[in-house]
Image: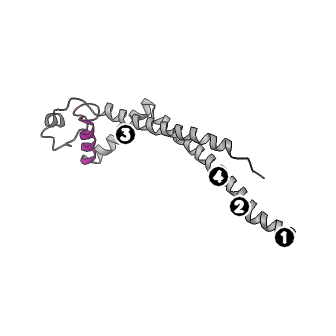
Amino acid sequence: MNLAAFSYAITRAVPAVLTKIHTTLSTVFLLMLDTVVVTLSGNVLTKSFTECMYEYRWTEMFRAKDGPAIRGIQDSLDCCGYRTLNHMAYPLPPRNVTTCAQETKRTHACSGPWTQAGQSTAEMVGGICIVLAIAKVPLVARSPAVWY
């Protein structure tokens, strides 16, 4: 009789308990991960951090003479240069026969639009993570506490 009960416990009860523990731990881990992502996206939203980060990245591309990357940003945001129309703009020197603004008739620099695009993305990621975290809270609250 004891062997039958023990056999039942091993095959049925223990896996069920382990499944509940695994599910609860997984959900708690995902909530912690959401918290980290929301915190990091919140840090990106601070204007001084964002401006510094984007200026550093643009300067890196300019020093590496990564014209296609700079041109891609300028074309997608319809702008020229970083701080002004001629500041670290594509086409890169010494090929600067004509400037970006002369070639494309663009009238504004890229620092503002690029920073705004990054902040919008961070807001979107943060918002999605908040919604997902709120959706997971009932799952954690509903799962039974089986820590024995």
Q: Of the residues shown, which amino acid type is indicated by label 2?
A: Pro
Q: CA separation, marks 2 and 4?
A: 12 Å
Q: Earlier in the sequence, mark 1 or mark 3?
A: 1
Q: Is residue 88 visible?
A: yes
Residue tagged by mark 1? 3
The amino acid on which the numbered mark 1 sits, given as a three-letter code, is: Leu
Q: Which residue is mark 3?
A: 56
In percent of the image, x 14 and y 37: which residue is there? Answer: 103
Label 1, label 2: how far apart the Cα atoms are: 18 Å
Element type where label 1 sits in the image: helix
- The mark closer to the camera, 3 or 4, is 4
Secondary element at image label 2: helix
Helix, strand or loop status at disc 3: helix
SS state under label 4:
helix
Q: Nearer the viewer, residue 123 or 6?
A: 6
Tell me which segment is drawn in magenta: 68-89
* In the image, residue 78 lies in the stretch drawn in magenta: yes
Front residue of 144 and 103: 144
Residue at 22 percent of width and 32 percent of height? 85
- What kind of residue is marked 3? Tyr
Tell me which label, 2 or 4, sits earlier in the chain: 2
Q: Tell me what residue is drawn at x 36 percent, y 32 percent.
A: 116
